[in-house]
Image: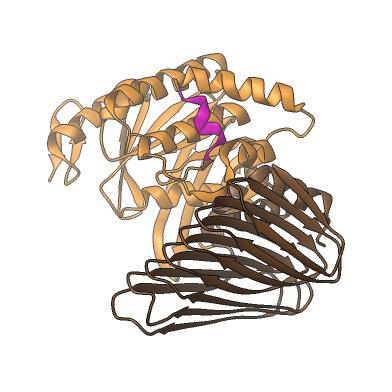
Chain colours: A brown, B orange
Amino acid sequence: MNKIYIDTTNYELIIKDNETYFLESNKDIINLNIIVEENINSKVIYMVKDSNINLSLELKENSNLTINTLGINSGISSLITLEKNTNLRFIESIISMVDTINKIKINHLGWSSKSTYINNGINLGNNKFYFEVDGVITKDAKESFLEEDSLIINIGDGDSKIIPNLIVDNHDVVANHAAFIGNFKNEDIWYLESRGISKDEIEKILINATLLKGVEEKDNFMNFLENNKWR
Amino acid sequence: MEIELKNLEVKVEDKSVLKDFNLKIHEGEIHAIMGPNGVGKSTLSKVIMGYPNYKVVNGDILVDGNSILNLEINERSKLGIFLVYQNPIAIDGVSFREVIKASVDSGKSLYDFVKDLESNADKLEMDKKNLHRDFNVGFSGGERKKNEILWLLMLKPKFIILDELDSGLDVDSLKVVTDTLNKYLEENPKTSLMIITHYTRILDYLKPEFVHMVKDGKIIQSGDFKLAKLIEKFGYNQTFDINEEIINE
């Protein structure tokens, strides 16, 4: 695993090998440019606190990338481009008690490109928490697949919004979107209470579960959450 | 643990689901509650557990002589009440082991906890890899029931409610689970058990001393194990004289 600590505002990562990259940073604003070269199969894990990230992500032909991001009080705006025969699995988890606007644009430029974009958010306070997700499939991107799944758990009285757009310019594609804003299910809370677990502990379990859903490297995320108090 | 339901009336969204329900279970006793679908059997389990959407409008629930109506769900659990759910939930993103850990004595070291958990998993012939999987996600109905019993063994309750334990369990798993429960009851002779079921199959393994037939939210007949056999043979549409068989169709 390649560990990189980003301590500059502008950082470029060009991935040329089939490795896992583990990124952390502490800057208020970070402009991060990631390029995955042709025929590369890679993974990126990115954890950040109290930052605004502008991510530019480019997948070259026949490349495959899994990216898991965890943000604490952080907004992540992403501009993603997918060339021919690429596969992106992007899981973004954000917990915040400050105003957080996450803008994501996924451009399918090439034939048979595939993207699965899952964003799970926890809005802790009375703040704004938005996911604005644009999925674009261009005319040249036939036989492409685009899936967006957005969820925000509103724990306080915050203003949470999910604004999805699918802009599709080819008939021979699959594109879908799902969105949920709400609180944890009472049935889940009562079930855990019936095993003697306190309400505070249940909230912690369900928050962790939301942020770790679908994430492969759970231990890294767990440690980051434990070591960085979010309340 | 002794538990008593006294003249209990329960409403859900203004609809009466239990009426004038009376039952006393002494320490170490095994009772079976039998009835067709929709007569209030599962309601009973949720009411004892303290689910807030089930409103007790009359009567009381006493544990060792003290009312528990003002206790929260987790406080009832800490008293020693354990409900084995008919359909346990699943939680994506957090492992079974982590969730159980949050419920056990915080004074226990991680080493002792893991040792205890794995030894109990062995009793239930469980694959230990499942302890690290997301909580009940992708598990079969039978595996979820085994997870419930594993959690029971970790919490060592004094009053156990089994809500349709045998649904989803194949014959071999049912035997493993009921053997484990019987051993637990043998080692903890003051623990009492309430079995909620449609069918008598599970009763052949757990052998209740008392059987109660429920209809329209109340007990309409009580008896010994023979009552369960009569229900199995003739159904729920009549009451029985234990010696004369059917007395009231």
Corner quadrant of residue B202: top left
Q: Is residue B95 left or right of residue B7?
A: right
Residue at the image position 45 percent from the left and 64 percent from the top = B11
| B128 is within the stretch colored magenta | yes
Image location (x, y in percent) of residue B91: 53, 50
Image location (x, y in percent) of residue A208: 66, 53
Image location (x, y in percent) of residue B44: 44, 49
- Relative to B72, residue A12 above or below: below
Count the marks: how many? Answer: 0
Q: Overall secondary structure of the magenta stretch?
A: helix
Residue at the image position 60 percent from the left and 70 percent from the top = A152
| A52 is within the stretch colored magenta | no
- Relative to A31, residue B92 above or below: above
Residue at the image position 60 percent from the left and 25 percent from the top = B117
State which region is magenta: B126-133
Q: Nearer the viewer, residue B129 or B180?
A: B129
Q: Nearer the viewer, residue A228 or B147?
A: A228
Q: Quadrant of the N terminus of chain A?
A: top right
Residue at the image position 83 percent from the left and 56 percent from the top = A229
Is residue A70 in view from this perspective?
A: yes
Image location (x, y in percent) of residue A107: 51, 76
Corner quadrant of residue B226: top left
Corner quadrant of residue B223: top left
Is residue B207 in view from this perspective?
A: no
- Relative to B189, residue B221 above or below: below
